[in-house]
């Protein structure tokens, strides 16, 4: 049996084995042997985390995010609520990467991810929008400079626009990258469950299409796949 415990140096992991001493007439009771497996367990946890979360930003990876989408959609169906999928992409990220280098680009992605976390964690004061359960797993780096996020508990689909605008505002503030001050914007595409689709991959495809519509409209804006209502 494996179990964990707190030690002065941090959390430790052990495996316990019990031996019944009935085979020894002169000995009564059970002998319990503890073996410290902390090093092995931490290595396993690290491998698992690498598989589920992006190393740079700490956000969920694509496959894990899609799994979370399925769970969130099932919950929304039971509660008869709407769920918004936001597909986000940085505007002009390639130019920054090319002119300032990949290190600066990575720093920017980390900062953008943190600002997205902050914006998406904030529940609307009127209770109209909130992150779905397991919030940390419902924001993802989809690849490169693309991100996705789920917003649940919507009584009206158009309430997703509040979150989208808040996220646009958070990301658009200036950044200091290696001594240079720059401004970055994002574009957002939004698809709504269940009105736009009830399959994770289909919803992603529609949100991605809405994202490109937002970019065609001039960037630094959001666009719904089929209108907010």
Image (cartoon, rainbow, N blue to C red):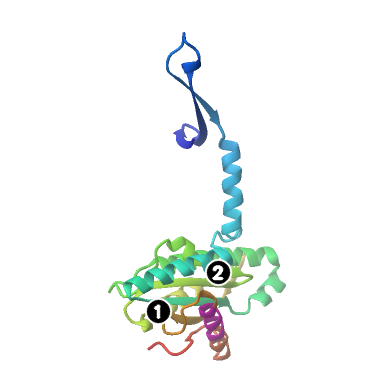
Can residue 130 be spotted in the picture? Answer: no
Q: Quadrant of residue 153?
A: bottom left
Q: Nearer the viewer, mark 1 or mark 2?
A: 1
Question: Which quarter of the figure is the C terminus placed in?
Answer: bottom left
Q: Are marks 1 and 2 in contact (CB under 8 Å)?
A: no
Which element is circle 2 on? strand
- Residue depicted at x 63% and y 64%: 106
Predominant secondary structure, magenta span: helix
For mark 1, give the secondary structure. Answer: helix
Nearer-the-camera pick, 93 or 200: 200
Closer to the camera in the image, 173 or 220: 220
Which label sits on residue 175? Answer: 2
Q: Which mark is residue 122?
A: none
- Identify the image quadrant of residue 96: bottom right
Q: Residue at x 46, y 89 (%)?
A: 226
Against 133, residue 126 (above or below) is: below
Is residue 99 left or right of 134 when viewed as pictured? right
Residue found at the far top of this picture: 26
The magenta stretch is 202-210
- Can you identify the residue that label 1 sits on? 160
Up/down of 29 relative to 157, above or below? above
């Amino acid at each position: 049996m494996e179990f964990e415990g707190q030690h002065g140096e941090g959390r430790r992991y052990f495996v316990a084995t019990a031996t019944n001493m009935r085979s020894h007439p002169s000995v009564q009771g059970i002998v319990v042997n503890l073996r410290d497996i902390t090093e092995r367990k931490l290595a396993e946890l690290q491998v698992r985390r690498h598989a589920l979360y992006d190393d740079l930003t700490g956000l969920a990876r694509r496959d894990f995010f899609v799994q979370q989408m399925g769970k969130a959609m099932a919950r929304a169906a039971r509660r008869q609520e709407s769920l918004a999928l936001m597909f986000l992409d940085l505007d002009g990220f390639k130019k920054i990467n090319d002119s300032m280098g990949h290190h600066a680009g990575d720093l920017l992605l980390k900062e953008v991810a943190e600002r997205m976390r902050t914006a998406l964690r904030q529940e609307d004061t009127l209770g109209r929008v909130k992150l779905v359960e397991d919030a940390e797993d419902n924001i993802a780096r989809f690849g490169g400079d693309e991100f996705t996020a789920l917003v649940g508990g919507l009584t009206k689909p158009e309430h997703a626009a509040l979150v989208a605008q808040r996220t646009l505002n958070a990301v658009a503030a200036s950044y200091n990258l290696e001594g240079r001050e720059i401004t970055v914007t994002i574009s957002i595409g939004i698809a709504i469950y269940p009105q736009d689709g009830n399959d994770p991959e289909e919803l992603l495809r529609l949100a991605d299409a809405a994202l490109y519509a937002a970019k065609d409209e001039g960037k630094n804006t959001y666009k719904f796949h089929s209108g907010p209502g």
